[in-house]
Amino acid sequence: MEQLKLGNITVDLVQKNIKNMHLSVYPTTGRVRISAPYKMDLDTVRAFAISKLSWIKKQQTKIKGQEREAPREFINMEIHYFNGTRYLLKVIEHEAVPKVVLKHCIIELFVRPGTNREKRKAVLEKWYRQKLKEIIPVLIEKWETKMNVLVNEFGVKKMKTRWGTCNLKAKRIWLNLELAKKPAQCLEFIVVHEMVHLLERNHNDRFISLLDKFMPEWKFYKDELIRVPVRRDDWNY
């Protein structure tokens, strides 16, 4: 992977079989990447990056200012999130299959006696995954009708730098497991974002126009993903 230096900003350059350039600033480090067509010369890419410096710095400032929580230990009275709401964790030891029960302001985590941090984390993450798999199909069905597109398959996985991805050929979308902790509208925005890629591959003017058409308030939800606290260990997979 080539890199461009723009003062104190490093830009990762990836050349692909695409028609247009695409610029991304990734959470939570503010890493910058440009995807460009194979035959595009470096001077053209550099000129494009320089023209976007103000936007890059603005996005990095937002990311650096995002509230961070300390790494979780999965013990009693810790704060955990589901659907953008804060819950207190209550760890309950029992001699049975581990499970999670959501109550008014508490997440009850049932585990066997002596269960360590990593296993407690795995039980909670399994619950998050199950919840997303209940919610996402409803959202996909809703937006398939509105957008007149078809999603063949979806999945949930941990992703380091993206909230979602779309495989156009397979018509398959992937959603980041961390979205279970974010407000429901943010999850829906990411679902819509990835489904718009079934109509437009690139993040170009047409893509933005389609987002504006289907979800006029999408910019608010995008900013909300930055405003909602993230854990310092969320991205250390």
Image: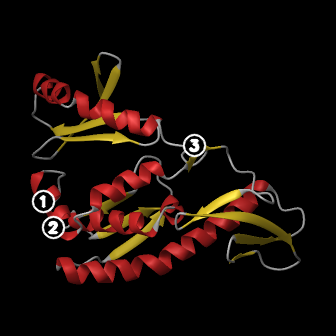
Q: Is residue 122 left or right of residue 214?
A: right
Amino acid residing under circle 1: Ser
Marks 3/2: CA–CA distance:
33 Å
Q: Residue 68's mark?
A: 3
Q: Residue 54 at x, y = what percent?
A: 24, 29
Mark 2 surroundings: few (<14), some (14-19) or many (≥20) residues within 10 A: few
For label 2, the SS is helix
For label 3, the SS is strand
In the displayed structure, 9 sits above or below 190; it is above
Instruction: Determine whether label 2 and label 1 are within 8 Å by CB.
Output: yes
Amino acid residing under circle 3: Arg
Q: Give the camera-side residue of 136 and 116.
A: 136
Q: Earlier in the sequence, mark 3 or mark 1?
A: 3
> In the figure, residue 39 lies in which quadrant?
top left
The answer to whether residue 72 is visible is yes
Q: Which residue is mark 2?
A: 213
Residue drawn at point x = 33 percent, y = 65 percent: 189
Residue drawn at point x = 56 percent, y = 75 percent: 130
